[in-house]
Image (tube, grey):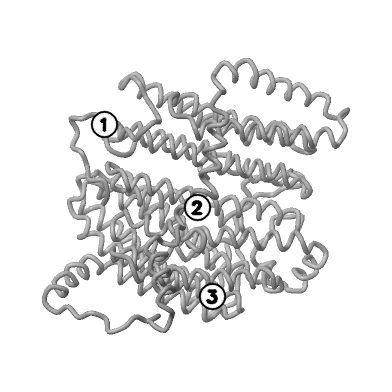
Amino acid sequence: MMTPFLHLILLLPLIGFVVSLLIPESKENLMSRWTFGMVGLNFCLLFAFVVLWMFHGAEATNFKDWSLFQSQDYNFYIDFYFDKITAIYGLIGGFLTFLITLYSRYYLHREKGYKRFFNTLWFFNLGYNWAVFSGNLETLFVGWEILGISSFLLISFYRERYLPVKNAVRVFSIYRIGDVGLILAMWLMHHFWHENITFSTLVDHAQVNAHLHKHTIIGAAIGFLILLSAYAKSAQIPFSSWLPRAMEGPTPSSAIFYGSLSVHLGVFLMLRMYPFLESQVSVRVAMVILGLITSFITTNIARVQSSVKSQIAYASIAQIGLIFVEIGMGWLDLALFHFCGNAFLRTYQLLVSPSVVSYMIREQFYDFKSMPHSRISWLPKKWMNSLYILSLKEFNLEKLNFYLFWSPLKRLGRNFGFLRQTHFLFVFLPLFLAGVGLQFYLDHLKHQSSTMLSVFFAFIGLVMVLRSFAEKKNVTMAWWLIALNHAFIALAVSFNEHFTYSHVILYLSGVGVAVLCGHFVLKSLKKKEGRLSLHHFQGHVYEYKGLALAFLLCGLGISGFPITTSFIGEDLIFSHIHENQWILATLIALSFIVDGLAMVRIYSRIFLGPHAKTYHEIAYRSS
């Protein structure tokens, strides 16, 4: 009885999203009423489901639904799980989405992106429900990816302006760091359990401890990778600088995304994985220490911010750091209660922030009172001044992220700048064909030789996508280099046993369709506009909205988003990488992450930002 009820709750956001796409842009009232009514219905159904679940004993329930792909030693299936964590996250998410929908009906009235905002809100709601109802990491990753791309779309809502688009790319790049942690964690979990594990299995402490006793190092690696994903998603140190940059979107999206729901998804991941991490003292100690450091640093940064939204963002990060401390200490109920309070408070603060700004400006003119003393006046004067300057500079977190993550990627990409189209035609294409030819002699190759060939071809694939990430002139070449990256990845894993031709076809079929369609879109745009470049933003979405949407869908397909078979293929690839092939796994994970960044970079540079044509109105730099 409860399973069809659950399916209806998960299906409603999808129905709402599809119908919202069909509503004309001029029908503001119809769009808002449809969204308001369906979101309200979804919340009521979820509330009724929770009451029914509590009436039946409030026991944690697993719903194994359907298998998307199954082979001899691999099964990719969709799984849902319901317990008190899901109930609290689901109810809070449903109520706040309903509240934001009501607020946005009037706040965004006559905004030219009115329909686009509600489309993206539906998309977000779909991803959030899939994430919090997920019963295994694969299902959670579907919602995780949907939230990532909807976050990019909401931050770049004012897509004619420079800073919203630039900050959207930055935030998406941090999300991709979280993705690589989750992908590698899923790969190690496959080898840890030798199956696709569900969250309901992790509750069995005896079984988990028995596995951890045999594979201590793998268990610790999984724990720290999960911690990396959670900290990137929840803007903890050293990733804290992205959250204030995400406030470039409209106030309602800032409230629901970066004040209440999406930013707490890292907390949800740690709560869900806590039975696995409970006996891993090193991971829990790291969680407590990093949470305390985050709270201290971001509290001081929040106190010196001149923007009210940035101040709220850093204050929220500080509270989330304390929530991670509570989880590390084992106080899960307190962490859940803290999540509810922080989510409601930050949503309220962000929604009233425009009014607060005008009120405070008036107040400082007519009733200004200076603070009698600072909260840290007991510190020596030099320490206070140093802390003040560091807080003003946001502890140089933005520069730290740039030098740790993006500067090496750009530098590597530029180092391969000497590669031209002739090199790909006369060097790498014959190399790829030679690798395909070696497949016929795979039985005669030694195990060590096969391993070295796998690493070699995976490295070549990474070179392809790094070259694409750094390309500035030839858009078509940058696009096809992403496709070559996937081809070399499939070739690299083909040297491992049991990775059959059917698996290669499953993986590359979705990529192939996306690449060809994307190439057609680029060719059509080039015919209309002439020269295309990646040197700067060109804003062609002004005049070619259909082509922009088509290219975005192609980009999602080529980067393994859950709309093509390449998403299943990526997980299938990692299931065939052995646990001792950590170099191969790292190279392929980096390739998947960078190809998403390269795709978003191409889309943003061509279709978003200030328009290259001077007869269009020049937009403000920031929102």
| Secondary element at tag 3 | helix
> Could you tell which of marks 2 and 3 lies nearer the N-terminus?
3
Where is residue 105 drawn, in percent x and y?
A: 23, 59
Which residue is located at x 68 percent, y 23 percent?
432
Residue labelled with disc 3 = 84
Q: Which residue has dot 1 on it? A: 543
- Residue at point 47% right, 61% down? 235
Residue 438 is situated, as x and y percent measured from the top left of the image, at 78, 24
Q: Is residue 8 visible?
A: no
Q: Residue at x 41, y 52 (%)?
A: 151
Type of amino acid under label 3 = Lys
Q: Amino acid at mark 2?
A: Asn
Q: Are marks 1 and 3 in contact (CB under 8 Å)?
A: no
Question: Left or right: where does residue 62 sit relative to residue 149?
Answer: right
Q: Which residue is mark 2?
A: 401
- How far is mark 1 from mark 3, CA to CA? 48 Å
For the residues labelled 2 and 3, the Cα–Cα distance comes to 36 Å
Residue type at the position of mark 1: Glu
